[in-house]
Image: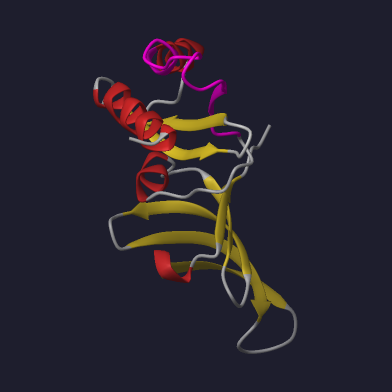
Amino acid sequence: MTFKEKVNTLVEECLSEKPSLFLIDLTITDAFKVIVNIDGDNGVALQDCIDVSRSIEGNLDREEQDYSLEVASVGVGSPLKMVRQYKKNVGRTLIVKTSTENIEAELVEANDDFVVLSWQAREPKKIGKGKETVQKTLELPYSDIKEAIVTVTF
């Protein structure tokens, strides 16, 4: 078993014990720096990162392979990568990039196939001069989303 396979197995075992957590990214560099990014249905606590780190570290031998380990939660400005992340962020505002446009909208619904976005836009009036505010809704398949980031409002 290669070092990467062993680390991957250890991460999967650890996260199977904590069903609310899930793996976003596992990277192992040429210099054996192991970077594990996790997310959770209810967020990620510092203790969750510590538990995952200890679980991995406790089952690897530094005599066999010297490595460094970094376990972190995904950052606030990190793009959403998994359907589970979209579902967890329903009700929040996203900046969604598609091949044709950028949309800042509220994530109204997320299922296994698509998301539903809702936002207000200023458009020319159908009759007369000037603009009016209209409510827009878009059903967008995940395959059309290039990048989606949760916006933080204060």
Q: Nearer the viewer, residue 119 or 99?
A: 99
Q: Is residue 138 above or below residue 40?
A: below
Q: Nearer the viewer, residue 109 or 111?
A: 111
Q: Is residue 53 above or below residue 140?
A: above
Q: Nearer the viewer, residue 115 or 4?
A: 4
Q: Range of the magenta residues?
A: 55-75
Quadrant for the C terminus, please.
Answer: top right
- The location of residue 127, given as percent across then percent down, is 63, 89
Confirm whether the magenta stretch covers residue 72: yes
The reply to whether residue 20 is visible in this rendering is: no
Name the residue at 64% across, 41% down: 77
The reply to whether residue 125 is visible in this rendering is: yes
Q: Nearer the viewer, residue 8 or 48?
A: 8
- The location of residue 102, given as percent across then percent down, is 64, 66
- The location of residue 37, given as percent across then percent down, is 50, 33
Name the residue at 61% across, 35% down: 76
| Residue 63 shown left or right of residue 141 in the figure | right
Name the residue at 65% across, 37% down: 153
Quadrant of residue 103 within the rendered picture: bottom right
- The location of residue 115, given as percent across then percent down, is 39, 59
Confirm whether the magenta stretch covers residue 57: yes
